[in-house]
Image (cartoon, rainbow, N blue to C red):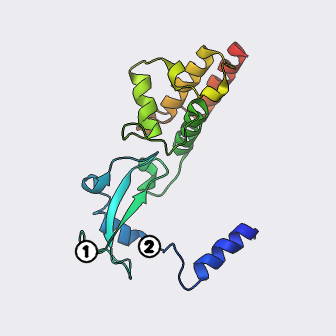
Amino acid sequence: MTPEMIEVRAHFQSPNPTLKEVKFADLKKATKNFSMHVRIPPTYVGRVFLAWVEQNTLAPSKERDGIAVAVKRHIPFDKWLVSRLTTKSDIYGFGVMLLESITGRRVFFLHENQTLVDWATGIHTNKRNVKEIIDPRLEDNYSLQSVSECFSLAVRCVSNNPADRPSSEEVLQNLERIHALYK
């Protein structure tokens, strides 16, 4: 066990850890089965749901009759609900990483109350100039066409519909083709 893991374990074994364990069933109840009616505008890759829980017991409570907590989603929602990860959810994660690499923005980036994924998808849909979203730290050490193609691939990878995401083989073929054309 690493020193970090030992420190984390010790923290949770302390009499008053800062983080508390909450049962999934309680979160489901507190968020009204993760209803879109209790959704907060997105803050990053996923959705954030507002839940109210008892301060001492963390049991679900009525609105404003306890403390508010946020449930953040880090993986594609289609897989989070069924708690099963697939190749298509891995492709989604790869697309997010590719968007972060191209834009230099973290997944937590917010622009006009949009997630990085929503923001990038909007730029792609509106066919805006890709140059304006490229991380300035890249200092023109790239082919604009190659970045544009990588950006399009990333947007396909983060499609809301898993069936619209490319396969891992297709992602690899696209990246190899882009590399061969623009190296």
User: Is the residue 127 above or below the residue 53 in the image?
Assistant: above
Across and down, in percent, residue 44 comes to 45, 46
User: Is the residue 63 above or below the residue 127 in the image?
Assistant: below
Across and down, in percent, residue 137 comes to 65, 29
**Left or right: residue 79 compared with residue 27:** right
Task: Identify the residue position indicated by label 2 in the image.
Answer: 22
Which three-letter amino acid code belongs to the residue tagged 1?
Answer: Asp
Q: How many marks?
A: 2
Corner quadrant of residue 87: top right
Crowd band around label 2 with a 10 angstrom C-alpha radius: few (<14), some (14–19), many (20+):
few
Rendered residue at 36%/41% (across/down): 113
Corner quadrant of residue 142: top right
Rendered residue at 41%/60% (across/down): 71
Which three-letter amino acid code belongs to the residue tagged 2?
Answer: Val
The N terminus - image quarter: bottom right
User: Is the residue 34 above or below the residue 156 in the image?
Assistant: below
Q: Which mark is residue 92?
A: none
Rendered residue at 62%/18% (across/down): 146
Disc 1 element: loop
Q: Using the image as rendered, state which of residue 155 and residue 168 is in the foreground.
A: 155
- Nearest-to-viewer mark from 1 and 2: 1
Task: Identify the residue position indicated by label 1 in the image.
Answer: 65
The answer for how far apart the CA atoms under marks 1 and 2 are is 18 Å
Across and down, in percent, residue 37 comes to 24, 54
The C terminus - image quarter: top right
